[in-house]
Amino acid sequence: MPIYSDKVMDHFMHPRNVGEIENPDGVGEEGNPVCGDMMTFYIKVKDNRLEDVKFKTFGCGAAIAVSSMVSEMAMGKTLEEALKITPAAVAAQLEGLPKNKYHCSNLGAQALHKAIEDYRSKKTQGEKKS
């Protein structure tokens, strides 16, 4: 069994920002069919900042902890700052992940980035229509 840091255990046992946002501005989904982890991030954007970030994750403890940490790291950030959240930064904030669980940090960052891309593409389409 992998040894997890206290921070990973805390975010696994008490995940922050779990849930869905009604009428989100962006949604990003990322999954790894090999390990079965699925993450969906929902964002609300106001004045180019992430006003709210929620997630739903189906997966192992590391995947849940990563999702929780990514949501905390992203909250209140500008879209540009949030896009700079890297898997390495997530793992560092969690005080490390076992090697065989490191892919979870990729999923969390990618799902957040996809939610931002989704928001931006919707916004661009909206501007084209008006």
Image (cartoon, helix red, strand yellow):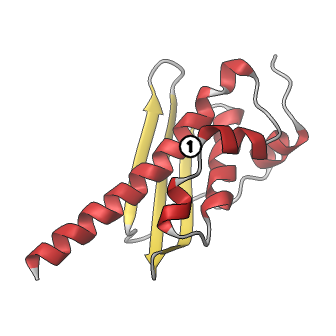
Of 53 and 22, the residue lying toward us: 53
Residue situated in front as seen by the camera: 12 or 97:
97
Mark 1, residue position: 108
Q: Could you tell me which quadrant the N terminus lies in? A: top right
Q: Quadrant of residue 72?
A: bottom right
Marks counted in the figure total 1
Image spot of residue 127 (x, y percent): 17, 77
Q: Residue at x 72, y 52 (%)?
A: 15
Residue 115 picture location, percent across and down: 41, 56
How many residues crowd mark 1 within 10 Å: few (<14), some (14–19), many (20+)?
Answer: many
Q: Is residue 55 visible?
A: yes
Q: Is residue 128 left or right of residue 60?
A: left
Left or right for 24, reference 68: left
Q: Quadrant of the C terminus?
A: bottom left
Identify the image quadrant of residue 129.
Answer: bottom left
The three-letter code of the residue at mark 1 reads: Gly
Residue 59 appears in the picture as rendered = no
Residue at image point 45% right, 76% down: 48
As helix, strand or loop, the secondary structure at mark 1 comes to helix
The residue positioned farthest toward the left in the image shown = 129
Residue at 80% x, 46% y: name it. 13
Residue pictured at 32% horizontal, 57% vertical: 118
Question: In the picture provided, is 124 more to the left or to the right than 69?
Answer: left
Q: Find residue 99 and report its horizontal and vertical position in percent.
A: 71, 20
Q: Nearer the viewer, residue 109 or 64?
A: 109
In the depicted structure, whether residue 120 falls above or below residue 33: below
Residue 83 position within the rendered picture, expressed as x and y whole percent measured from the top left: 50, 55
